[in-house]
Amino acid sequence: MEEKEIANQGFIRPARQETIEQFWAARWGIPIVTPTWIYRPGDVEGLSLRDAEERVLGLITWKVNAAQAEIVSFDTVEHSRGWGSLLLQAAEEELQAGQAESIRVFTTNDNLPGLRFYLHRGYRLVKVHLDAMDHVREIKPRVPTVGRQGVAIRDLWEVQKAL
């Protein structure tokens, strides 16, 4: 993908490894752990949304294995601005052009806004990974045990969409 200008929003462009590493370190910590893999910045590709001053407003990263793509990280610095929708749509277009047939995402069981976001965009809940956060905490012990609105973070929801 080449740089794509988003009117009054900024630019979406391929994310550099340094950008991924800095954003992950600040927002999530390294590595990122899912039920399928332990990811480091060099394992993924992605897109960043930047403003006119080159500040990163959002980042989406993924890994493709055969025809299955997995979103590894997806975050914006502000919510409800439409940035997430722009990034997800651009990533889906990029993955589809690269011959991915489906895309999946994992999110924690306290993330009802995230689940709603994906469901509104055609994703379906395909699996609940019970107690998956125990495995994550073995690798990243600082991951909190309690999340949004006091919900215990225990499981991972897997949502998927055909491309």
Image: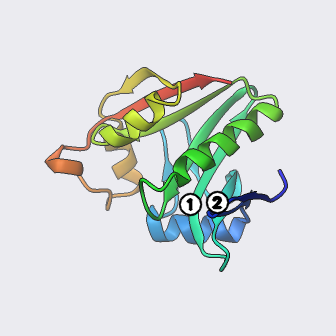
Instruction: Mark 2 or mark 1: name the one nearer the start of the chain.
Output: 2
The residue depicted at 61 percent of the width and 48 percent of the height is: 86
Q: Is residue 35 visible?
A: no
Q: Residues within 10 Å of mark 1 (few under 14, many from 20)?
A: many
Determine the residue positioned at 31% across, 35% down: 155
What x and y, as percent, mark residue 81? Answer: 47, 56
- Is there CB contact under 8 Å for labels 2 and 1? no
Q: Residue at position x 76%, y 41% from top?
A: 94
Q: Quadrant of residue 47?
A: bottom right
Between 145 and 78, the one lying in front of the other is: 78
The residue lying toward the viewer, choosing from 60 and 84, is 84
At which x and y percent is residue 63? 67, 42
Q: Position of residue 130 (x, y in %)?
A: 31, 28
Reading the image, the residue beneath label 1 is 58
- Kind of residue sitting beneath label 2: Pro
**As rendered, which of 11 and 71 lies closer to the eye?**
11
Horizontal placement of 119 versus 149: left or right? right
Quadrant into which the C terminus falls: top right
Instruction: Tell me if residue 42 can be seen.
Output: yes
* Amino acid carrying mark 1 in the image: Gly
Secondary structure type for disc 2: helix
Q: Residue furthest front?
A: 8
**Helix, strand or loop at mark 1:** strand
Image quadrant where residue 66 sits: top right
Nearest-to-viewer mark from 2 and 1: 1
Q: Is residue 81 left or right of residue 151?
A: right
Left or right: 119 in relation to 141: right
The numbered mark at residue 41 is 2
Instruction: Specify few, some or many for label 2: CA neighbours under 10 Å numbering under 14, 14-19, or 20 or more.
Output: many
